[in-house]
Image (cartoon, grey):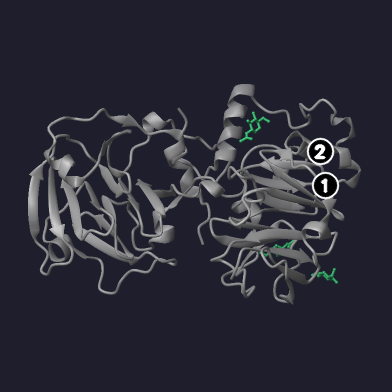
Amino acid sequence: VMLLSQTLCLCFALALSYASFNLHLTLTLTGPLDHGHDHHEDQAHHSANPDRCDGIEFDAIAPDEKGNSFFFKGDHLWKGFTGPAQVSSAFFMELDDHHHLGHVDAAFRMHNKEKPEDHDHIFLFLDDKVFSYYNHSLEEGYPKDIQLDFPGVPSHLDAAVECPKGDCNSDSVLFFKGEEVYNYDIATQSVKVRQWAHLPNCTSAFRWLEQYYCFHGHNFTRFHPVSGEVNGAYPKDARHYFMSCPKFGHGGDAKVPKCSEVTLDAITSDKSGKTYAFTGRIYMRLDTHRDGKHAFPIARTWKEVTDGVDAVFSYSDKIYIIKGDQVYIYKSAAPSTLIEGYPKSLTEELGIEGPVNAAFVCEDHHIVHIIQGQTMYDIDLSATPRTVAREAPLPISGIEAGMCGPDGIKVFVGSEYYHYETPRILAFSRIRPEPKTITPDMMGCVE
Ligand SMILES: *[C@@H]1O[C@H](CO)[C@@H](O)[C@H](O)[C@H]1NC(C)=O
Ligand SMILES: *[C@@H]1O[C@H](CO)[C@@H](O)[C@H](O)[C@H]1NC(C)=O
Ligand SMILES: *[C@@H]1O[C@H](CO)[C@@H](O)[C@H](O)[C@H]1NC(C)=O
């Protein structure tokens, strides 16, 4: 499981989704928050601001199209993992016309590539009505009766969560009501009703970074979306993981680094498009814009790598992690498992001496390009024994990380990077391209 931990506080991108860091910016600009008051004009009919660190039961949880996660409770919500409650109607305006309903029963984000007009919409369920929002505007024709959009799905739901094809057999939605789970197939509109007796009744459900969570009380339980199976020690207290609470784990001092202060030890993208940036003992997934960008301890995913990395590259279905004079080879598919016999020495595995600064393989090629100081070594991974086939001096020094993707090569020097179309151009061009700066979009940092 990839979840947040204490160690993150020290690090470059503390488990922050874009949502929370936007919020963080707002906080910085408006000064300390007064928990007793809303800034919303018509707050008169709203109940007092709840505090999620008190240990509350959420009504619904869902991300929007930008990867902001919303946690609903009564007529309030929280945007992201940090920050205070706000009135729901500040984000989903028309809910206020229905405020007599009091709360959202369930919410999910639609995953439906076949039907672009619904894809990424956030659907909110109140009693027997469904609301569809995109870009925080209510779509025309909504609210409508739930059964008009979701035949066979009951009113007065407890929870809902998207289940895209790949996780489920087809693009689906899981609806929860009491002990019943309704598996709704989006394309065929067919419903299968199940009971997962071992799972508590979920009052909200959330898909986050490819995992499924059932929330009950202030706890949550991770489950498999097809079998309902629960593996591991659950329930867990949500305050340790899904929010920033002073007495629970990672504390409230979330500090988002400036982009000009971000430096990388390594960066790589695997075959399935998962992209990882490494710095210190932390890594960040860069391809998860649908769920926001988040940082995790490296050792949480690659257990044996406890002291950071020097270079990382992906080759076929494996990820190679280099630290000092050691190479760790892991299967890319989750959960990451270390190949038997590893770590091995760099000399034995690649025929070179450590330490190295950066390493990358270009798509479908068998050559790993290893950068050491101002030299690049090419090693053929399809040959045995592995030996340096070519060696070239580089036009720039201080490279700490590099990756090769469909749009060419990026090599990182401090908080800047250089773009080259091919390894050959990197090795042989004498013209130094203009450096580019790491942007918030790339790394979840701030300008
Ligand atoms: C989203 O809404 C904002 C303001 O309501 C508007 O300015 C913007 O153009 C909208 N974006 C899209 C993609 O519809
Ligand atoms: C789960 O929901 C059912 C139906 O509403 C109810 O009878 C049952 O008591 C609930 N279980 C728990 C543990 O709350
Ligand atoms: C939450 O989980 C703990 C065990 O981890 C359990 O003792 C407690 O009763 C649970 N509380 C709720 C409200 O589910």
**Residue sitting at x 87%, y 38%:** 97
Q: Describe residue 345's horizontal placement relative to residue 145 as left or right.
A: left
| Cβ atoms at labels 2 and 1 below 8 Å apart | yes
Q: Quadrant of the C terminus?
A: top left
Q: Which amino acid, mark 2?
A: Glu
Q: Quadrant of residue 305?
A: bottom left
Q: What residue is shown with label 2?
A: 94
Pointer 2 residue Cβ closer than 8 Å to ligand 1:
no
Q: What residue is shown with label 1?
A: 143
Q: Residues within 10 Å of mark 2 (few under 14, many from 20)?
A: some
Q: Which amino acid, mark 1?
A: Pro
- Residue 260 can be seen, yes or no: yes
Please tell me whether mark 1 sits on a helix, a strand or a loop.
loop
Q: Position of residue 199 (x, y in %)?
A: 70, 71
Q: Position of residue 12 (x, y in %)?
A: 42, 39
Q: Quadrant of ligand 1?
A: top right
Please tell me whether mark 2 or mark 1 is closer to you in this view.
Answer: 1
Q: Quadrant of residue 414?
A: top left
